[in-house]
Image: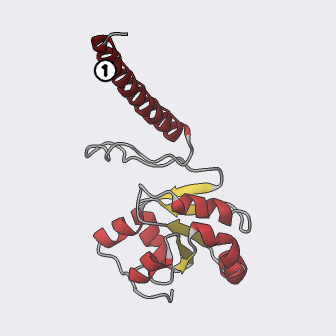
């Protein structure tokens, strides 16, 4: 094989490798987007809609009901609802709704025995996390349905919306 032919073949191999890698990246991205779109806990890909249009929201499983900020505030003021913060302990410690219990998704099973009485005696259970982009509240709410009757509410816009509205927040590990 001549020298020029070997050089040419080397460029073709590098070009083929590049095309193959690009195809793998694009294929993986397309598959990821498709799975995310079809998943009941998929993450919104685009920004919230323009004013006047409905805000993006995550799909809710059966028995879980979406709650808006005004409804969450009314439930908080009425005093019969138990709020559950589904964020990790460090985030909870930095600030949470007064009286909210901390039950992160990975600790639901371990914490349920300690909070079962509070959950079953509450007029309503409202689970929240950071905001609409966070699906942890939905996962925790779904797990709580194993021990309490429907519905479990998810305050979908979460702590971010609560703070933006100027509502009370408390710090530390105590509810």
Q: Can you say whether 115 is above or below 38 in the image?
A: below
Horizontal side, residue 102 vs residue 90: left or right: right
Q: Quadrant of the N terminus?
A: top left
x 36%, y 81%: residue: 168
Query: Circle 1 — which element?
Result: helix
Where 148 falls versus 68 (above or below)? below
State whether residue 63 appears in this view. yes
Q: Residues within 10 Å of mark 1 (few under 14, many from 20)?
A: few
Find residue 70 and report its image quarter. Answer: bottom left
In the displayed structure, 171 sits above or below 151; it is below
Kindly identify which residue carries mark 1. Answer: 11
Q: Residue at x 45, y 79 (%)?
A: 90
- Which residue appears at 53% of the width and 37% of the height? 35
Residue 3 appears left or right of 100: left
At which x and y percent is residue 163? 32, 72
**Picture mark count:** 1
> Which quarter of the picture shows residue 15?
top left
Give the color scheme: rainbow, by chain, secondary structure or one colour.
secondary structure
Q: Is residue 55 above or below residue 97?
A: above
Mark yes or no: residue 120 visible: no
142 and 12: which is toward the camera: 12
Q: Name the one closer to the observer, 57 or 30.
A: 30
> Measured from the top left, where is residue 67 in percent x and y?
48, 60
**Viewer-proximal residue among 14 and 147:** 14
Q: x, y percentage for residue 19?
A: 37, 24
Residue at 63% of width from left, 77% of height from top?
122
Can you give x and y, in whole percent of width and height, for residue 132 in the image? 41, 56
């Amino acid at each position: 094989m001549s020298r020029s032919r070997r050089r040419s073949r080397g460029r073709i191999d590098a070009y083929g490798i590049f095309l193959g890698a690009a195809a793998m990246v694009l294929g993986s991205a397309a598959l990821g987007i498709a799975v995310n779109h079809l998943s009941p806990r998929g993450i919104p890909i685009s920004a919230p809609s323009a004013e006047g249009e409905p805000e993006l929201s995550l799909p809710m499983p059966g028995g879980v009901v979406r709650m808006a900020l005004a409804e969450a505030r009314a439930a908080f003021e009425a005093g019969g609802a138990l709020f559950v913060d589904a964020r990790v302990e460090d985030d909870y410690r930095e600030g949470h709704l007064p009286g909210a219990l901390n039950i992160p998704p990975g600790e639901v099973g371990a914490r349920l025995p300690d909070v079962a009485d509070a959950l079953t005696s509450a007029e309503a259970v409202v689970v929240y996390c950071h905001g609409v982009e966070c699906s942890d509240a939905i996962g925790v709410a779904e797990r709580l349905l194993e021990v309490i009757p429907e519905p479990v509410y998810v305050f979908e816009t979460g702590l971010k919306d609560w703070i933006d509205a100027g509502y009370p927040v408390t710090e530390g590990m105590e509810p």
